[in-house]
Amino acid sequence: MSNVEVALAVPLMYGRVKPNSLYGLRTERTLRDEDAWYRGNAYGGRLFFRTGLVALVAVIGLYCVPSLRDNFVAYNIACGAVIVGGLLFTTVLVVRFVHSL
């Protein structure tokens, strides 16, 4: 899941995604203002890229914890918490950035 987050962030970071209704940071502001679209998505892409890398390292690190490695359910809950928590935190930061433009 983290690798998908990283892969989806790269085109956003480099401004390769034109304003659309399917992919990218879609707020009223970014859909109305093309400059806000590219600035918001570049910022968001960089944050989501970093968040994905941190989550990937954390998931690998959690696998190294013997008690989690032996408990499939606990490991998946811990990984899910890291991934979803990172996504939510990053989303809040990106939306706040767009509102500040």
Image (tube, rainbow, N blue to C red):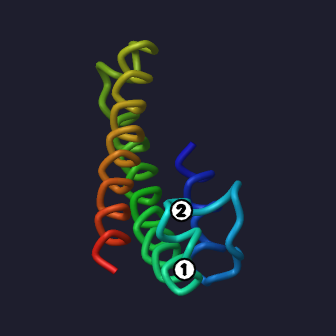
- Badge 1: how crowded within 10 Å, few (<14), some, or many (20+)? few
Q: What residue is at 32 percent from the left and 69 percent from the top?
A: 99
19 left or right of 89 in image: right
What amino acid is found at the position of numbered circle 1 in the picture?
A: Asp
Nearest to the observer: residue 18 or residue 80 = 18
Q: Residue shown at 29%/64% (left/top)?
A: 96
Say which of 28 and 35 sits in front. Answer: 28
**In this image, 10 relative to 89: left or right?**
right
Q: CA distance from mark 2 to mark 1?
A: 12 Å
Image label count: 2
The amino acid type found where label 2 is placed reads Leu
Looking at the rendering, which quadrant does residue 80 occupy? top left
Q: Secondary structure at mark 2?
A: loop
Q: Which residue is mark 1?
A: 33
Q: Are marks 2 and 1 in contact (CB under 8 Å)?
A: no
Which of the image's four quarters has the C terminus? bottom left
Mark 2 or mark 1: whose residue is earlier in sequence: 2
Q: Which mark is residue 25?
A: 2
Q: Is residue 79 above or below residue 23?
A: above
Residue 97: numbered disc: none
